[in-house]
Amino acid sequence: MKASVVVTVFNKEPFLKECFDSILAQDLDDFEVIAVDDWSTDSGPDLIRAIDDRRVRMIRTERNLGPAGAAQRGIDLARGEYIIRVDADDICLPGRFSRQVELMDARPDLCASGGHLRLFGAEEGLWRFPVGQDACRAEVLFGNPIAQPTAIMRADFLRKHSLRFGDDWPRIGEDWMLWARMLQHGSMDNIDAPLVEYRRGAQNSTHGTRRADYRSVILEDVFALYGIPFDQERCALHLVALRSFRTKPDERLIAGFHGWLQELKELNARRRLFPEPAFTERLDRAWQDLFYMVSDIDPLLGLRHWLKGPVRDARRLVYLGKLGLGRLRDRRSDDRA
């Protein structure tokens, strides 16, 4: 069998028809669908049982395990050469499966791959993921190299290296933890196109959560895997690169973040954990992204960042000037009111 499609299901009844319709309409000839009910309390499992298609089978976890354990139960039963992951509230774009299988067949060096996400629902846009093996490997300290809702994995690779989701892994970010382990043994890449319509709304696992809290747990795990020194101070600084602040940004945070990125750059020069120049480019992007985050909070902080950076782009001074003028106009309007 060419592929096993693993769909974890927990209280996603309103979205299941669209999701499964998009799966069963794929043009790949040879695949099975394993729906894993993680003890849903709605009627979603009944809708899946009613699907009249021999390719679909459903199992139930022994208890509510969360996304990691539920996905692993499906992977354990997979008969396909490839594991394709689908989120139960998303919609696979036409041709997704065949396109991904074609890439993996042509690139035996890849242990997994994915693509971009087209957002719909409460938010619209396109979430892009790194394209190129080096870019994916350089991303692993900063986020997901591939998006789990678009992921295809080589089943033999997972078994050969005993790579599994842990039942005790967090309910958010479990994919990042698996990718970090897979990248120690293989390579990843992304198709430079959207493969999935990713539904944004209150049903998302990250909705209503404090990002800094769950990301701290994941970062501690990933940095330990690569043997990189990491403590609470470093964690607070690295969270800045993930747009998560434990404290309100100030000049001290900007200086500390600059120093932390330099520490990572020097460590990689010694140990060669991540490919160059992709890793340095990723560090530079983390630094440049901070400019807009702090400038929107306080233009003076943006100026401090601009003065600290190795490259001083005049366009950013123009941006700061416009921000400052806009705030001045707002104050005058408030005074007149």
Image (cartoon, grey):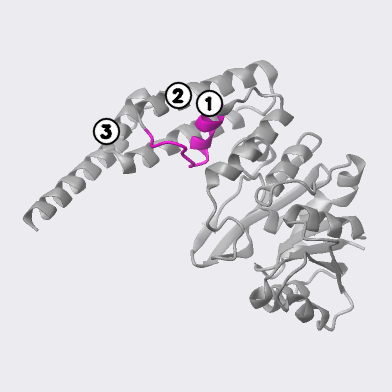
- Whole-Å distance between the Cαs marked 2 and 3? 17 Å
Q: Nearer the viewer, mark 3 or mark 1?
A: 1
Residue 233's tag is 1
Residue 300's tag is 3
Quarter occupied by residue 88: bottom right
Residue under the point 91% across and 60% down: 77
Q: Looking at the image, is mark 3 or mark 1 earlier in the sequence? A: 1
The kind of secondary structure element at disc 2 is helix
Q: Looking at the image, is mark 2 or mark 3 earlier in the sequence? A: 2
The residue type indicated by label 3 comes to Leu
The kind of secondary structure element at disc 3 is helix
Kindly give the residue lying farthest to the top in the view shown. Answer: 270
Magenta-drawn stretch contains 62: no
Residue nearest the observer in this picture, 218 or 101: 218
Residue 149: % across, % down: 68, 58
Q: Say if 147 sits above or below 306 in the image.
A: below
Label 3, residues with CA under 10 Å away: few <14, some 14-19, many ≥20 = some
CB of mark 2 within 8 Å of CB of mark 1?
A: yes
The residue type indicated by label 1 comes to Glu
Q: Is residue 90 visible?
A: yes
Quarter occupied by residue 229: top right
